[in-house]
Image (tube, rainbow, N blue to C red):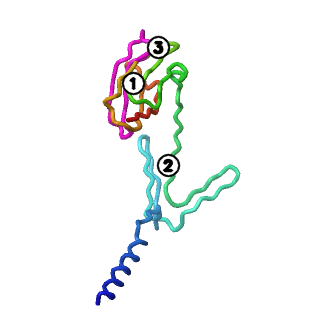
Amino acid sequence: MKTIITYCVLFFLALNTNLSGQNMDQELISSAGETLANSSVRLDFSLGEISIETASASNVILTQGFHQSVLSVTEVLEVGSKDDIQVFPNPTQEYLNIQFTGNMDELGYARIYSLVGKMVFEDEIISTELTKRIDIKHIKAGQYLLVISTDDDRILNTYRIVKLN
């Protein structure tokens, strides 16, 4: 009897090892769909698709299946040069030095965030300071993001900081 129970338990354990998760593929079977638009709104819809495929020629791309999102490219303007701000030592245990060179009229704040986005430190930067020394002894060991921003919260530079024990 114990042998049968042991085999049953092993069978169910072996069966469950293959059931590690689901694949959520973007599949759809549709019989109708349309695009409606007016001056302020565009609506794309479908009731299902028979096939999902992409075909291309020299200057044309045809996609079937899921609605294709519009590609929007945003220009990123360089506000400050990374050479104007130096952060050291990194990794560090106790103090973090931020050295400023060049035009520092736009400086406002030095903030340290955890990788989940929680602010763990904030200090104002005065434009006459050439070096800002930050005491980070109270911060737990780990990786953080140091964000240097202006008074109106425009981000100048972001640095990955490693805090050691």
Residue position for label 3: 104
Q: Which residue is mark 2?
A: 69
| Residue type highlighted by circle 3 | Met
Classed neighbour count for the residue bearing mark 2: other residues with Cα under 10 Å, few (<14), some (14–19), many (≥20): few
Query: What's the residue type where badge 1 is placed?
Result: Tyr
Q: Secondary structure at mark 2?
A: loop
Instruction: Please tell me which residue is depicted at 45% across the width and 60% down the height of the picture.
Output: 46
* Position above or below: 140 against 45: above
Give the mark nearest the N terminus, 1 or 2. 2
Residue nearest the observer in this picture, 162 or 65 = 162
Ranked by sequence position, the earlier of labels 3 and 1 is 1
Mark 2 and mark 3 lie on one chain; the one further toward the N terminus is 2
Residue 18 part of the magenta segment: no
Q: CA distance from mark 1 to mark 2?
A: 46 Å
Q: CA distance from mark 2 to mark 3?
A: 40 Å
Q: Position of residue 61 (x, y in %)?
A: 62, 53
Q: Name the spot of residue 118 as percent of width and height, x first.
A: 32, 36
Looking at the rendered image, the disc whose residue lies closer to the viewer, 1 or 2, is 1
Circle 1 sits on which residue? 95
Contact flag, marks 3 and 1 (Cβ < 8 Å): no
**Screen quadrant of the N terminus:** bottom left
Residue range highlighted in magenta: 107-132
